[in-house]
Every structure is written in structure tokens, then in C-alpha cells.
Amino acid sequence: MTPTTPAELAARIAARHTPGQTMVAGITGSVAVGKTTLARQIADALPAGLTVEIVSTDGFLKPNAVLEAEGLSLRKGFPESFDAPALAAALAGLKTLPSFGPVTVPAYSHTTYDVDPAAARIIAAADIVLIEGLGLAPAAGQRPPLDLLIYIDAAEADIIAWFLARFMRLWDAAATDPGSFYARFRQMSEAEARQFALSIWNGINRPNWLEHIELARQVADIVVLKALDHRLSL
């Protein structure tokens, strides 16, 4: 494996950008593997003259009320939990900025664990759009219409460690935030909360990763391996 850095990945993206056009690069991988963090690091490392936007696919999840009505509450993150037509339309619009016109992208709150309509934003123009999250695996054998796709791979034990750390961080924060989705788990002891989080990984996130998300690895332009200490290699 060859060591790499977010700056080197940013250079590869910038080299493929055509002036005057919007380049849409996807970043995907398992839940908790660090997609959002890598997107921010790449954005920070891109040349200062480029206008960069980061979009999370989480915003294209169906609202919790819809998921509940469709019996999909325990399938959040699986392909059927996304508003696939809206995500496809947004990708098409972003790729043709600015001639297509402004694209409204929805947003998601990890605190409320739901789509946040008030946080939606409008993207009128961009040189590079980094779209990170789930929902970027091939569907019906077709790769999403992206100019570049990065897949973050990691050992399952490391992903579990990151997932548990994130869950417990949100669980801790809920102690002083009754509006948090995670406040409902505060009656659990710390050990019980960790065990509950592990059951979520094993029952929901792991099957989704192996059955769906990992398919993106096969069609990715760049596959990076992330170590427990967050070092990257190609």
C-alpha cells in the first residue's frame, strides 16, 4: 500500500477538473468510516481559486415520519430509505451548474436523527462539489453519474471502534440536550448504551455495508484504506 494524504487526493481531483465546468466527486464507504471528515479535509486542501461545495447524501434520506409509515425505520441508510429520484435530480443539476440553475440541497441533523428542512441550502455555482455519504453505490448495475468516486475502506474492527465512539459522544451530549434523539437512550448505563450501539452495527449497519455500500468499491476510481490512527493509503 502507498501512503497518501487528503492533500494528495485533492491534487488528483483538481487535476481532473475542467475550468468552466462543475466537477462532482463522490466520497463513500461504511457508516462511521470518516466520509464527512475526509470531504472537509479535501475541500480545505483544494486550490484556493476553486469554489468548493460539500453536500451530504444524508439530506436525501426520507424523513423519519415517512420511514416509519413505510416500515423502514430500521432500514435507515439502506437504498430504499433514500429519496432516490431527488438525489438523482440533484446530482444531474449539480453536474450542469450554472446553466441548470440553482440546486437546492436538503440537510440532515445527526442530533435529531432526521432531515432538517430549515437547514436546506441553495447552490448556484461551484467548480467542485464533493458529495459524501451513503446512497452512492451502483443501482441496477449503474454507477451514479459522478465525475470521480472515492471509496474509503477500513478493517471492520476499526469501523466498529469509530462507530461506538461517535454513538457514545452523541449519547454523552444528550445528557444536557433533551431535544437530542439520543436523549431516549440516557436511561441506559454507559455499558448498556455501548452494547445497544453494537447491536445497531451488527443488525443494521454491517448488513448494509456488506450487501450494498461495499458495491461502490468495485466501481470507485480511487480506493483508500484508512487505518485506526486515520492514516490513509492507496
Image (cartoon, rainbow, N blue to C red):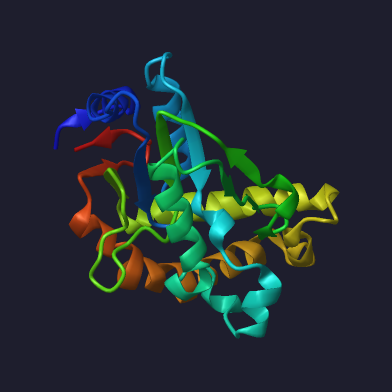
| Residue at position x 77%, y 62% in the image | 186
| Residue at position x 28%, y 43% in the image | 147
Quarter-wise, where is residue 8 in the image?
top left
Does 68 appear above or below 187?
A: below
| Residue at position x 50%, y 54% in the image | 57
Quadrant location, the C terminus: top left
Q: Is residue 160 visible?
A: yes
Residue 221 x, y percent position in the rendering: 20, 45
Residue placed furthest toward the left = 1
Quarter-wise, where is residue 127 in the image?
top left
Residue 196 x, y percent position in the rendering: 60, 69
Q: Is residue 32 visible?
A: no
Residue nearest the observer in this picture, 50 or 7: 50
Does 185 appear above or below 105?
A: below
Quadrant location, the N terminus: top left
Does 7 appear above or below 109?
A: above
Is residue 168 found left or right of 143 in the rendered image?
Answer: right
Is residue 174 found left or right of 52 in the rendered image?
Answer: right
Is residue 190 found left or right of 233 in the rendered image?
Answer: right
Residue placed furthest toward the front = 99
Residue 12 x, y percent position in the rendering: 23, 28
